[in-house]
Structure formats: structure tokens, C-alpha cells
Image (cartoon, helix red, strand yellow):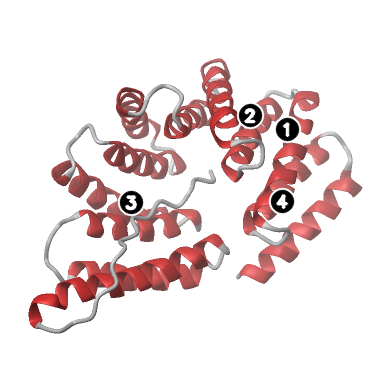
Amino acid sequence: MNQALRCLQLAISLTCFSAMDAALCEATQWDKYTDAARAAYKRGQYSEAESGFSSALKEAEKSGQEDTRLAVSLNNLADVYRTQGKYAQAEPLYKRALTIKEKVLGPDHPSTAKALNNLAEVYRAQGKYAEAEPLYIRALAINEKTLGPDHPDVAIDLNNLALLYENQGKYTEAEPFFKRSLAIKEKTLGPDNPSLATGINNLAAHYENQGKYADAEPLYKRSLAIKEKALGPDHPDVATALKNYAHLLRATNRTAEAEKLEARAQTIMAKTR
């Protein structure tokens, strides 16, 4: 699924005048790597993002301390791996980030909830549903308590739980989570947010999986329109939206329409490799 990149940006602008300033200057170098990698990630340039986040991680490890900066670096690099389907590489990074956040921030901190969600997502993607479910439920409980029931992060938690049940064919359990997540996103993020588009797409896929094509199609169209407007016509997420809609078109015997969308998606992906 398409989740938002979460990075901790440190606002530091210093010049090294002594050895005591060195650690702070290293933080500035970490910022440079992180900011550049974040920008590449948003453009869908994952190879460049991977390189930048790897450099940021090396900077964070120089201090020898397990702090939030190190946890953020681990998480960011894991995000890039997960986005590319490199789950085996992402999993140990997410585990290490979670351990650091639980130690530094505490077990009930919203940032710890994000780390729980990220690790659960990797488990879900690999079909490790039993490992993923308790992590999702714990993250949801933390965020509802600390952030409130209508916070955007709660919407993410609900969506993730819905996907977990959807992947197991538990459609009855999944649907209320999808709908509550979408309602929160529409209320808090507005009608043109890419995160809203992801939620709409997921509900569309939920209906398509059950053969409810008439319910699914307008949702796929809306998701695609939002992503094109928010991210630009050549973003990898737009390609994903095109392929999802094309899948429904094929399922409803509209092969010619599907092929046009698939060809456009292939063109986009070729540009971003």
C-alpha cells in the first residue's frame, strides 16, 4: 500500500569552530542527505533515495548512540526498500527502529505507533498475518488514546487493519475499517490529498474483490484523478492507479480501454527506473 514518508527534519545551521561543534555539524550533514533523499523519494526516484538514506544512516551511526535520529534513518531506508518490495531488507531495519523508539520515547508514544505500523506492513506484505495483527491493533490503541479518534494517523491504522483482513478474504471485517478510515481522511485532509486517494483505491479494490464492479469503478476513477492532480501525471503512484483501474476494466470485458491505461502505466514506470 501507499503510505507517506515520515522523516524527522532537524533545523540546524552551524559552522564548526571546535571539536565540540563536530557532532552538531555531523547533524547538518545528516540533514543534507535526508532532505535530498526525501525529495528523490517523493519524485519516485528510489535508487537515488536509497543512496541518500544509506548515507544519512551512516552519519547517524557515527555517534554510537541509539537516538531518534538513528531510528528515523533506519525507518527512512526501510521505507524505500518496502516501496520497492524488498521486504527482507526492510524488516530488520524496521525492527531496529522500533526497538530504539520504544527505549527512547516509550512504548505508548505516537512515533512508536508508527514504527509498529511499519513493521506490521512488512509482515502483511509477506503474508505473515498472525505477526502483523497484534502490531496493528497496538498501534491503533496508542493513537486513539494519544491523538484522538479522528486523527489522520488513526485513519492510517484503520486502513492497515482493513487491508490485513482483506488479504485474508475477511471482507465483512475489513469494510467498516476501510469506511471509517476514509471518513477521517476526507474530514481532516481534504478532497485532493494523495493519502485520501490511497484510501479510496483500497475501498475500490475491496468492492472489486467481491465482484461489486459498479461500486468499485467510480472510486478507481476518483483515486486516479486525485493522484494525477497532486503528484503529477508521471509519478509511479499514478502508474499504480492506472493499473488498478485497468484490472477492473479487464474484469468487465473492456480490454481495449484497459490496454490504453496499461500502456500509459508502462511508460511512466520506464521513466522512473
* Image vertical order of residue 114 relative to residue 187, above or below: below
Which of the two discs, 2 and 3, sits closer to the camera?
Answer: 2
Q: Amino acid at mark 3?
A: Glu
Expressed as whole percent of the image width and height from the top left, the position of residue 3 reads: 49, 45
Find out whether the residues at labels 1 and 4 contact each other: C-beta distance under 8 Å: no
Write the residue at 29% across / 72% down: 13
Label 4: element kind: helix
Q: In the rendered structure, which disc, 1 or 2, sits on the residue that comes first in sequence? A: 2
Q: Which numbered circle lies on residue 229?
A: 4
Which of the two discs, 3 and 1, sits closer to the camera?
Answer: 1
Q: Residues within 10 Å of mark 4 (few under 14, many from 20)?
A: few
Write the residue at 68% across / 23% down: 210
Quadrant of the rendered structure where residue 139 is?
top left
Q: CA distance from mark 3 to mark 1?
A: 32 Å
Q: Amino acid at mark 2?
A: Leu
Q: Residues within 10 Å of mark 2 (few under 14, many from 20)?
A: many
Which of the two discs, 3 and 4, sits closer to the camera?
Answer: 4
Which residue carries the number 1 mark?
A: 219
Using residue 45 as the reference point, say whether residue 261 is left or right of it: right
Q: In the rendered structure, which disc, 2 or 3, sits on the residue that comes first in sequence? A: 3
Find out whether the residues at labels 1 and 2 contact each other: C-beta distance under 8 Å: yes
Q: Residues within 10 Å of mark 1 (few under 14, many from 20)?
A: many
Where is the C terminus found, in terms of image quarters?
Answer: bottom right
* Image vertical order of residue 163 relative to residue 266, above or below: above
Using residue 247 as the reference point, say whether residue 57 is left or right of it: left
Q: Amino acid at mark 4?
A: Lys
In the image shown, does 167 or 197 lie closer to the viewer? Answer: 197
Q: CA distance from mark 1 to mark 2?
A: 8 Å
Expressed as whole percent of the image width and height from the top left, the position of residue 85 reads: 48, 55
Find out whether the residues at labels 2 and 3 contact each other: C-beta distance under 8 Å: no
Which residue carries the number 2 mark?
A: 203
